[in-house]
Image (spheres, helix red, strand yellow):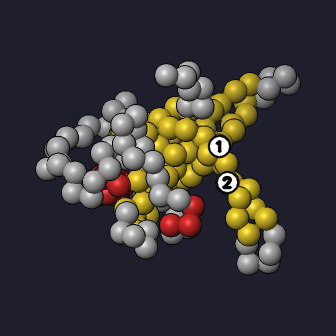
Amino acid sequence: MAYESNFITMIGNLTDDPDLRFTQSGVPVCNFRIASSRRFTDKAGQQQEETVFMTVNLWRDMAENVAESLHKGDRAIVIGRIKVRSYENKEGQTVWVTEIEADEVAPSLRWARVSVSKTSGSGTGGGGGGGWDSAPPPSDDDVPF
């Protein structure tokens, strides 16, 4: 197996509730935005804050689980792969976006508690939604966003 170096771990807060949709072929897909801030002191000794916003995409069972479990403001841990894609906006301009294709999403337990309940199998198929042994996401032609 080749060494995979395109992995990212991001910890932050959901900026909105997860948006669950379905492709034309019925595959669940969910996305949400996560914001992560860091504080630092600049060269002049002033406190600064920098916030990074990323869109996270999830597929199949994991998409449905996240949509049901996480909400705006929840702190989450996302592990996935960076994906860069482009699309043409309404004005005909090419827009480039950088997103995370999630392999794992979990609530952060640093300042919260959760109750875990297992789902009763793979209702929509595909395994864990982008992990090692699951099917890849649908083609770009079948993505609802």
Amino acid found under the numbered disc labelled 1: Val
Q: Using the image as rendered, state which of residue 27 and residue 109 is in the foreground.
A: 27
Looking at the image, residue 74 sits to the left or right of residue 50; the answer is left
Q: Residue at x 33, y 33 (%)?
A: 109
Residue assigned mark 1: 52
Q: Position of residue 135 (x, y in %)?
A: 39, 47
Q: Which one is closest to the eye, mark 1 or mark 2?
A: 2
Measuring 17% from the left and 44% from the top, which residue is drawn there? 118
Q: Is residue 15 visible?
A: no
Residue at 52% across, 46% down? 101
Mark 1 or 2, nearer chain start: 1
> Is 62 situated above or below 131?
below
Answer few, some or many: residues within 10 Å of disc 2's Cα (few below 14, many 20 plus, some between 14 and 19). Answer: few
Whether pointer 1 and pointer 2 mark residues with C-beta atoms closer than 8 Å, the reply is no
Q: Is residue 126 above or below residue 43?
A: below
Secondary structure of residue under mark 1 = strand
User: Percent x, y for residue 145?
Assistant: 55, 67
Tag 2 residue: 85
Q: Residue furthest bottom?
A: 90
Q: Disc 2 on helix, strand or loop?
A: strand
Residue at horizontal 52%, vertical 50%?
A: 56
Apparent side of residue 133 relative to residue 42 in the rendered image (left or right): left
Q: Say whether residue 89 is left or right of residue 116.
A: right
Q: Amino acid at mark 2?
A: Arg
Q: Which residue is outermost to the left?
A: 120
